Amino acid sequence: MVVFRQLESHNEQLGIRKAKRAVEDMLMKYNISHKEMKEFVEIISEAENWGYTSGWLEKWSFIGSLFFSGTVITTIGYGHFAPRTLAGRLFCMVYAFFGIPITWLMLTSLGRKIVEHIGLSLQNRKCKPESKLFSLFCLLVAMLLAAVVMGVIAIVGMFVEDWTFFEGIYFAFISLTTIGFGDYVPMHPKFDPEDVERSSFAISLFVLFCFLLFSFGLAVNTSVLLSIRKIMEDKTIFGFQSLYGTDTDEESDIEEEISRETRLE
């Protein structure tokens, strides 16, 4: 798109010129040919693919495999590492085929529960479900909850990954919307390459925390989408007809659940 080209092209050209100067300086400093430099870069790139940064770190540890499994079934897919063996790729395809629908059914169910609890809370504060603003209030609360989750992720990223607050927010947004570019990944917090055991423990805790937080965050994100859908289908607010033409049981589940729980109280 033209907007992205205008915003990113100049910075890309600056980066290319800077990289070219750095390469030329390296060639002159160490008196090596372009071919030797290319071979050296390929070796470094391959080492990075196998887990080398400032030290060696195993990617396919238990916690790394758990994190990868989570990015597959949530469709985030950062792309920072992936199966390389035929068996691994085949299993990944089967795992994703069954895991993605099950995961999103679960997240949709959790998102519905969140919307229901928000609706009950608003109803207890004398906001009637029939009110035109009821759905808007539900959406606002869900969005505030999503903002809190993103803020928590950003703050953790500042302390553990050395990101800025904006970088943390950007990472959280890209992750919770399942875009998953992979330019920021919660797998390389600050660690001492000489202290592998302690570093692996710290990374394991951080990755597990992110996995749990992302699960909740994706459920919250689903609740936001459900609230938006409800608003868009509410003819009293925007005048849109339901995508299904008529009100179905599925569309009225949340309202029925709220009314049922209110009667029980």
Image (cartoon, rainbow, N blue to C red):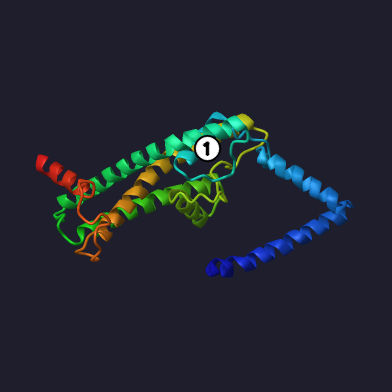
The C terminus is located in which quarter? top left
Circle 1 sits on which residue? 68
Q: Nearer the viewer, residue 90 or 104?
A: 90
Q: Secondary structure at mark 1?
A: helix
* Residue 265 seen in this snapshot: no
At x 16% / y 53%, what residue is drawn?
125
Q: Position of residue 157 (x, y in %)?
A: 51, 47
Residue 16 position (above or below residue 51): below
| Residue found 82% across the figure and 58% down from its top | 25
In which quarter of the view is residue 188 placed? top right
Q: Position of residue 67 (x, y in %)?
A: 51, 37
In this rendering, position of residue 35 left or right of residue 253:
right
Q: Left or right: where does residue 75 sit relative to residue 143?
A: right
Left or right of 114, for residue 38: right
Residue at the spot 47% in from the left edge and 54% down from the top edge? 169
Task: Please name the amino acid that badge 1 sits on.
Answer: Phe
Q: Is residue 75 left or right of residue 22?
A: left
Percent x, y for residue 261?
15, 42
Residue visible at 71% across and 41% down in the picture: 46
* Most distant residue in the front direction: 245
Q: Position of residue 134 (x, y in %)?
A: 20, 57
The answer to whether residue 26 shows anywhere in this view is yes
